[in-house]
């Protein structure tokens, strides 16, 4: 079972998009090219290609979860560019003969991948001046503030102290900085940008977001899900009344190119 089983509708509705500053950086990476092919790996519900479609001429979406890919199909339908959907993992993506990407994006998904294998695959299916982008921010699990700390503690009452990665797995954190991993690949020239983000939330948005995650999806709570939601709403409403629900995050963008 996927780490994100049951989460796709919540993911499409409640996951924060990428900052406009990140869109500008990625647009600049392909500016001036006549033919601009975007490959988005671990696409989820298609947030990145939707944000970048004006900057490219073709989009290839790779997502192993069929429900997520169906949401991406809905989001990207009708765009004035060629869109191809691939229901497979990043590691198993097989590009057509002669196909090459100019821009590769991996947003909030690199930690789920066999990173050396994916980077090796990209070496053979990207243009010589392609940009590989690894980007993302934390989550409400990793955020540190009074309201997110209390929320995390409540989740742990039901799912255990260790962060979950779906119903039957524990989350395995990657200890090495992504910059180091990229530097050992063919895309060793790495440029890093840190974009501060202040993100206000409502109680409804937080609940929807939690159900989009692998650490707080509805199946993890079993028959206690309604009780959990009732307690979470009370906690969030209390914090909202005393200072609000604001997340201060940093959205990291790593632009990697061949040396």
Image: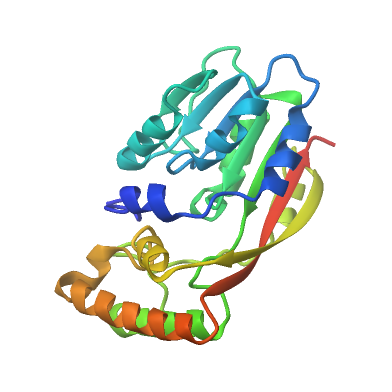
Q: Residue 48: image x %, image y %?
A: 56, 40
Q: Quadrant of residue 72?
A: top left
Q: Is residue 79 above or below residue 243?
A: above
Classify the position of the C terminus by image quarter.
Answer: top right
Front residue of 231 and 85: 231
Front residue of 248 and 90: 248
**Residue 29 in sight:** yes
At x 48% / y 31%, what residue is drawn? 61
Q: Residue 53: image x %, image y %?
A: 59, 28
Q: Residue furthest front?
A: 241
Horizontal side of 236 relative to 98 (left or right) equals left
At x 46% / y 84%, what residue is drawn? 241
Q: Residue furthest left?
A: 223
Horizontal side of 46 relative to 254 (left or right) equals left
**Residue 125 in sight:** no
Q: Residue 14: image x %, image y %?
A: 42, 55
Rendered image coloring scheme: rainbow
Q: Is residue 55 above or below residue 250?
A: above
Q: Is residue 245 above or below residue 15?
A: below
At x 32% / y 53%, what residue is drawn? 7
At x 41% / y 86%, what residue is drawn? 238
Front residue of 53 and 96: 53
Q: Quadrant of residue 136?
A: bottom right
Q: Residue 100: image x %, image y %?
A: 63, 20
């Amino acid at each position: 079972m996927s780490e994100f089983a049951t989460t796709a509708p919540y993911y499409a509705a409640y996951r924060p998009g990428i900052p406009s500053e990140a869109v500008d950086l990625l647009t600049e990476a392909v500016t001036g090219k006549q033919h601009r092919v975007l490959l988005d790996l671990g696409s989820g519900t298609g947030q990145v290609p939707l944000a970048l479609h004006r900057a490219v001429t073709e989009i290839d979406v790779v997502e192993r979860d069929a429900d997520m890919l169906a949401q991406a199909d809905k989001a990207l339908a009708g765009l004035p560019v060629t869109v191809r959907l691939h229901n497979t993992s990043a590691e198993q993506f097989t590009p057509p003969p002669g196909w090459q990407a100019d821009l590769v994006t991996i947003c909030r998904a690199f930690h789920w991948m066999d990173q050396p294998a994916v980077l090796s695959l990209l070496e053979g299916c990207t243009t010589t001046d392609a940009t590989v982008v690894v980007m993302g921010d934390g989550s409400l699990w990793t955020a540190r503030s009074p309201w997110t700390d209390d929320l995390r503690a409540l989740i742990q009452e039901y799912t255990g102290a260790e962060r979950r990665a779906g119903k039957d797995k524990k989350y395995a954190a990657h200890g090495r900085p992504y910059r180091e991993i990229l530097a050992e690949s063919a895309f060793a020239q790495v440029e890093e940008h840190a974009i501060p983000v202040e993100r206000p939330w409502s109680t409804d948005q937080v609940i929807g977001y939690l159900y989009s995650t692998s650490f707080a999806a509805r199946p993890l709570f079993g028959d206690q899900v309604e009780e959990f939601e009732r307690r979470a709403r009370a906690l969030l409403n209390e914090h909202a009344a005393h200072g609000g629900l604001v997340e201060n995050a940093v959205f990291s963008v790593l632009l990697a190119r061949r040396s």
